[in-house]
Amino acid sequence: MNTDALPEGRSSLQKVILVATVVSGFAAAYLMYRRGESLGSIAKQTITNPVGSLVSEVKNSV
């Protein structure tokens, strides 16, 4: 059994999750900026919960 494959797969998955989180934070920040929110509010929401911020912004725009 090859035990070296498990950590490599896990680290790749962690990288994908990290990139997806960062991208969702940028997208949420952009949508909030277009809506006219203050930069402090944008930073606070996207840093504490980037995915949740994106979900709420998408709900607001639809």
Image (spheres, rainbow, N blue to C red):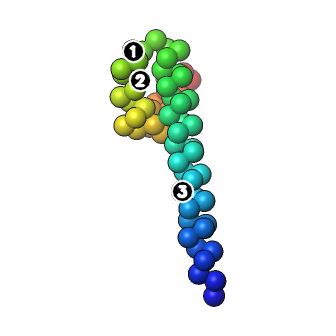
Furthest-top residue in this view: 36
Q: Which residue is mark 3?
A: 14
Residue 42, numbered label: 2
The image shows residue 23 at horizontal and vertical percentages of 57, 37
Amino acid on which the number 3 mark rests in the picture: Gln
Is 2 rendered above or below residue 62? below
Is 14 rendered above or below residue 27? below
Image marks 3 and 2: residues in contact by CB distance under 8 Å: no
Q: Residue at x 56, y 70 (%)?
A: 7
Q: Residues within 10 Å of mark 2 (few under 14, many from 20)?
A: some
Furthest-bottom residue in this view: 1
Q: What is the secondary structure assignment of the residue under circle 1?
A: loop
Q: Residue at x 60, y 59 (%)?
A: 12
The image shows residue 39 at horizontal and vertical percentages of 40, 18
Image marks 2 and 1: residues in contact by CB distance under 8 Å: yes
Q: Which residue is mark 1?
A: 38
Q: Earlier in the sequence, mark 3 or mark 2?
A: 3
Amino acid on which the number 1 mark rests in the picture: Ser
Q: What is the secondary structure assignment of the residue under circle 3?
A: helix
Q: Residue at x 57, y 44 (%)?
A: 20
Q: What is the secondary structure assignment of the residue under circle 2?
A: helix
Q: Residue at x 63, y 74 (%)?
A: 5
The image shows residue 55 at horizontal and vertical percentages of 49, 34
